[in-house]
Image (cartoon, rainbow, N blue to C red):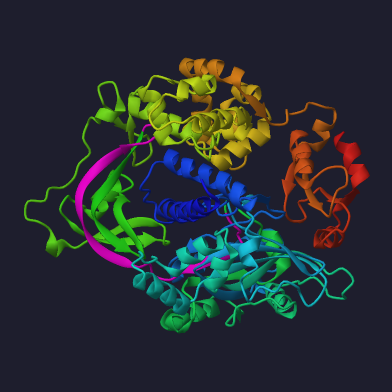
Amino acid sequence: MSTRAETERLQQLRETVAYHRERYHRDDAPEISDEAYDALLSELRTLELKVEGKVGAADVVGGAVNEAFAKVTHIVRQWSFDNVFTEAELREWDERLKRLIREADHDASELSYVAEHKIDGLKLIIEYRAGKLVRAATRGDGVVGENVTHTAKTIASLPPKLTKPVDLICIGEVWLSEKEFARINKERRQNGEPLYANPRNTAAGTLRQLDPAMAAARKLSLTTYDIDLFDPKHTGLTAPTSQWEELELLTQLGLPTSTHPKLCKNIAEVQKFYDSWLKKRETLPHAIDGVVMKVNGIALQRLLGHTAKAPRFGMAYKFPAEEATTVVEDIALQVGRTGVITPVAHLRPVLIDGSTVSRATLHNEDRIKELDIRVGDTVILRKAGDIIPEILSVVLSLRPKHAKPYSFPKRVPECGGDGLIERVPGEAAYRCVSKDSGTLHRRKLYYFVSKGALNIDGVGPKLIDLFLEHGLISSYADLFTLKEGDLRDLPSFKEKAAKNVIEAVKAARKVPLYRLLIGLSIDNVGEETARLIADTFGSLDAIKRASREEVAAIYGVGETVADSLVCWFEDPLHQQTLRELLPYLTVQNPTRRSTKSTAALTGKTFVLTGTLESMTRDEAKDRIRQAGGKVSSSVSKKTDYVVVGADPGSKAADAERLGVRMLLESEFTEMIS
């Protein structure tokens, strides 16, 4: 190809890849296979390197963390807030916080809140060093995000330099104004291009462009609202002690903050703030879908801490979700990877909040009976929390005359065997009696390779189906026996695609213990539970030997999970699965130690503060747990030791005030060694 031809081809590839990336990641409606998209992306990378000497538009992320972008491991883990939807739920949350504060021997009367708009945008983690912008990243999975500094720098309201030379990690929301969104769609309409669905998706897609010029042309905006880390250096500034002071500090440093925050003395004032903006939210330049409340005092925030999924000290109070009506065309039963059966309503497609919905879970038989949902019914549909479609009620006046009540069948062919199903004891769910169906086996393989389990990059349901169809695999272990030659003759498979799959499978051989537990599809064992079990026992052998009582005793696990876990490892078929699989894997998790220090630390609660020189904070936590101790995020009278590293925070002061023994790093190291 001539230089001109290569340049033209490069532009065509960029446009084509951008189009299909949006179809897949933004609209969840891909028009081509994953393999075809990967081939286009590979050609784009090659041509970019040849023509421009660097990879550009090929390194684009979509949705979760993508290998095409540089990964960023967050210094501070990122969380999402839980939601409430009613005033009653809001007040229940307030009462729960007060109870937790009182239980920790603190004064609950100090509780106040900072309320701000919940902007419908994309979370951005921004890092400054000595006052200069050095990195901006997406949230990703909370632990690892995507480096989007190149496009973030085009945001006019994001200063490249702060007013003071401090070190700072702050959190903000990137958004696109309704006015700018309308302008962009007007241009697309004039050019005969499909319109974007909503400002949020457009902002997210813009930030994830590789071409900064495109991002600059779309005029993104930013609002910052939180501080994760702050080092004043020698500026004379002091660390904020409240959420309100954090907003003031962000403003002082030259960062954009909400123009309408509210310091609320109690939950009633939060409700008043919510009600006022529910009526006038259309007056804002950006979309908001609710109000975010955070406990004002930083010390109380630390005291309250986090659950496995979200901060306890913050909550999103969502505005009423957008609703629509549609028709239930069928009720189908979906068999999950553990054999649990979920009824799903097949709906006449309907557009809600910029996306077309054609399915909604009905949860279980009790929910169907509660709503009396029948095939042919007109229903009111809501996207609960703007994510999951939910049927709220039936419009009985529009019910067909011959609509019959729905009842669960006795058999589901996808269950295997004779198809019999049974009620799960103590629950409103049904499950397959037989666990040997092809459907179940297929779903377990899907889950095994998925991002949440072994995370075999590029291997998803489509490839698993292809491998099964051609007899290349029948078990987890078979995946690790595949060779490039096995794949090259498969439909739509080229040499590069085959090599990528084999390399991805090879990379997955090193697997954290908790991810292996997830991938085995053990009933009731999800990510957080798997982490707790892995951290407690330290090795797969220890887990296999564990009794029901030992598993149930883990805080946050309980008897139901213990029964599932022990029964799974007692099953001869599962034992055979592990015998076949484990030779191919290196299971990574610190082995639980049995030392003289174990007895001394058993039941002891530790709090860590400051920076340790000989180990990371996570390593220190692991060492404590391995020696039988417990780790807490806040200091109370029940704390046994506070380990103090360099530049300790307020926890050291709390320890001194409460008379809790403080350990220097050398003392701590000696104790656990």
With respect to residue 364, does 349 lie above or below? below
Residue found at x 45% / y 56%: 15
State the residue in front, 625 or 586.
586
Is residue 618 found left or right of 496 in the rendered image? right
State the residue in front, 344 or 624.
344
Residue found at x 77% / y 56%: 635
| Residue 117 in sight in this render | yes
**Quarter of the picture holding the C terminus:** top right
Is residue 417 found left or right of 673 in the rendered image? left
Is residue 273 found left or right of 197 in the rendered image? right
Quarter of the rendering containing residue 655: bottom right
Quarter of the rendering containing residue 528: top right
State the residue in front, 430 or 191.
191
Residue found at x 35% / y 71%: 189
The magenta region covers 310-339
Is-magenta flag for residue 313? Answer: yes
Q: How many marks?
A: 0
Q: Main secondary structure of the magenta part?
A: strand
- The image position of residue 221, as x and y in percent, is 57, 74
- The image position of residue 294, as x and y in percent, is 61, 69
